[in-house]
Image: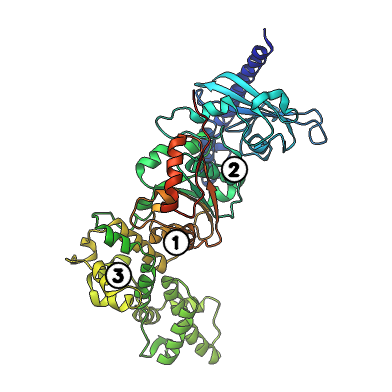
């Protein structure tokens, strides 16, 4: 048997054994249940954890269990020159020794980045060819003796691999597939960037920016498992069709801890979308200046105390003069808190003034007295009159129905013509009967955040971000207020009238001005003539971007 055939047979045996061990790992999890937990709550959590683990260990026989191998240079870190098979998930033998190493593990990094000039501690790299899960070929690349590999590794970053090229150019059909076997060095750098970094990935067509963003999410879920599982990962796409297209990428990489949604679904809790509007109106509603108009409108509800607060308690009637109540309002507003929290703080500020008076009489009060006083009806009613409840839909209905109310809060922000454009020609009688648009829901989301802080997730991946309005970007940014984002898009492919023209502006609207911009310029799937045409048009469409370049080889 020829050496290559013998080696191929050995690798096929290894693949079969790895699949067998993956099945063993799954069977072991299947044998566990919630009975090991100490109580029903722990049992529910354990059952859910085991179900997720079972899903992660699912084996699709048509998807290769591994796609590469690296051989370490013999030395201090690897006395015998170990080899590691690189795959989509970790597989171990019964003794716990790795048979397949997760592509996200640090040991896998050289598979994507090593070159003959910088071998990163490996002596050789092997790529595998598969057909419907069946191992058909392999291709070796020597990192220490590149002359042994011919054109596969000539010492530069453009070393050619027939298997790699075939995988990159394999026709795509159905849902989007992962690119984990073909990630290029510049893509791998982006994938493995720190969680703390908000990152913009600008990429021309065919550069793999969407796949890179999803693989970054998978990497972060691996590297920061507890944090991201606890606080959540959100993938935002431009429409439901797109989400259906990408839905299988993360599960194929062993990750199921990510929610996928459109911007309409994210803000859809406020009201159903029942209408559309002209592009100029939607563009204006998406303008970042609307945030200031809404802020003014919300806080205009806080009044100025003019009467004394009287609180009967036993045989006493305790009083807070109007001037002290005004001081309390000013102190709360100076804290720059959310509107609803400010209302609660005002109640406690008024109660504190009563508490001081009571203590000055020598009456001893326990630690709960302050909170009890804040919840009394006189204090609650007084605070509610000064700091009333604001309902988002009613407020927006009034802004879009009442020209005078809008003018009061848009003065110096919007022109008179812009204000006239915003006001409904035929206002609905009530907020409940209003036919809200998507742009309206984004405004409602802004108002809701002014009232109560929006919950933040650990990381957000947003694709086609160039087509989002400033107000949509603000809606995403506040959902990553204590987290980070991976922002994907191409300024040259903007399709909406409110589209972004500069990534710095996008980062400002996301409240991440220190975010970093990376450009992917290598087009792996788009033919060279298309790339060249795009490069010629780029100076007039998006002059600040680097021109794309084609890396597909011409076919004879």
Front residue of 95/239: it is 239
| Count of residue discs | 3
For the residues labelled 3 and 1, say whether their Cβ atoms are less than 8 Å apart: no
Image location of residue 265, percent across then percent down: 36, 51
Gap between marks 2 and 1 measured at Cα: 35 Å
Residue at image mark 1:
454
Image location of residue 365, percent across then percent down: 54, 82
Image location of residue 487, percent across then percent down: 49, 51
At label 2, counting other C-alpha atoms closer than 10 Å, the crowd grade (few under 14, some 14-19, many 20 or more) is some
Does dot 3 land on a helix, a strand or a loop? helix
Front residue of 517/82: it is 517
Does dot 2 land on a helix, a strand or a loop? helix
Q: Is residue 203 visible?
A: yes
Front residue of 262/330: it is 262
Pick whichever of labels 2 and 1 is earlier in the sequence.
2
Pick whichever of labels 3 and 1 is earlier in the sequence.
3
Residue at image mark 3:
395
In this view, the residue farthest toward the front is 536
Residue at image mark 2:
186
State the image quarter where residue 415 is shown: bottom left
């Amino acid at each position: 048997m020829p050496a290559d055939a013998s080696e191929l047979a050995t690798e096929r045996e290894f693949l079969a054994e790895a699949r067998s061990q993956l099945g063993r790992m799954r069977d072991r999890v299947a044998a566990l249940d919630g009975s090991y937990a100490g109580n029903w709550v722990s049992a529910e959590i354990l059952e859910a954890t085991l179900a997720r683990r079972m899903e992660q260990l699912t084996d699709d026989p048509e998807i290769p269990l591994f796609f590469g191998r690296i051989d370490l240079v013999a030395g201090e870190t690897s006395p015998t020159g170990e080899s590691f098979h690189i795959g989509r998930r970790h597989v171990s033998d019964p003794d716990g020794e790795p048979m397949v190493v997760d592509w996200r593990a640090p040991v896998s990094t050289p598979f994507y980045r090593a070159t003959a000039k910088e071998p990163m501690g490996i002596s050789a790299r092997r790529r595998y060819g598969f057909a419907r899960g069946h191992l058909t070929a392999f291709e070796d690349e020597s990192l220490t003796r590149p002359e042994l590999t011919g054109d596969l590794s000539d010492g530069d970053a453009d070393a050619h691999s027939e298997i790699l090229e075939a995988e990159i150019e394999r026709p795509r059909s159905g849902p989007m597939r992962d690119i984990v076997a073909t990630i290029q060095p510049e893509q791998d750098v982006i994938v493995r960037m720190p969680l703390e970094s908000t990152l913009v990935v600008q990429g021309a067509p065919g550069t793999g920016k969407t796949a890179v963003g999803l693989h970054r999410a998978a990497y972060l879920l691996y590297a920061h498992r507890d944090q991201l599982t606890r606080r959540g990962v959100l993938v935002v796409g431009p429409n439901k069709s797109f989400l259906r297209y990408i839905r299988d990428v993360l599960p194929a990489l062993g990750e199921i801890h990510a929610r996928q949604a459109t911007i309409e679904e994210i803000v859809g809790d406020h009201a159903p979308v029942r209408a559309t509007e002209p592009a100029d109106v939607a563009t204006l509603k998406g303008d970042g200046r609307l945030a200031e108009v809404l802020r003014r409108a919300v806080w205009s509800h806080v009044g100025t105390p003019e009467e004394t607060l009287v609180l009967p308690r036993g045989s006493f009637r305790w009083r807070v003069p109007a001037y002290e109540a005004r001081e309390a309002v000013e102190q709360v507003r100076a804290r720059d808190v959310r509107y609803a929290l400010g209302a609660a703080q005002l109640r406690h500020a008024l109660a504190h003034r009563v508490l001081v008076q009571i203590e000055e009489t020598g009456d001893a009060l326990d630690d709960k007295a302050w909170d009890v006083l804040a919840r009394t009806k006189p204090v609650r009613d007084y605070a509610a009159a000064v700091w009333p409840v604001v309902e988002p839909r009613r407020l927006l209905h009034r802004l879009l129905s009442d020209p005078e109310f809008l003018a009061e809060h848009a003065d110096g922000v919007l022109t008179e013509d812009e204000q006239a454009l915003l006001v409904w020609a035929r206002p609905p009688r009530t907020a409940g009967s209003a036919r809200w648009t998507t742009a309206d829901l984004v405004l409602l989301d802004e108002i809701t955040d002014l009232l109560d802080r929006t919950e933040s997730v650990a990381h957000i991946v947003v694709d086609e971000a160039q087509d989002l309005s400033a107000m949509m970007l603000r809606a995403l940014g506040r959902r990553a207020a204590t987290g980070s984002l991976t922002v994907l898009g191409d300024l040259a492919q903007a399709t909406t009238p409110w589209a972004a023209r500069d990534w710095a502006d996008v980062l400002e609207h996301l409240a991440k001005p220190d975010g970093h911009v990376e450009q992917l310029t290598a087009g792996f799937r788009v033919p060279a003539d298309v790339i060249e045409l795009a490069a010629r048009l780029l100076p007039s469409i998006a002059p600040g971007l680097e021109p794309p370049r084609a890396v597909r080889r011409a076919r004879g």
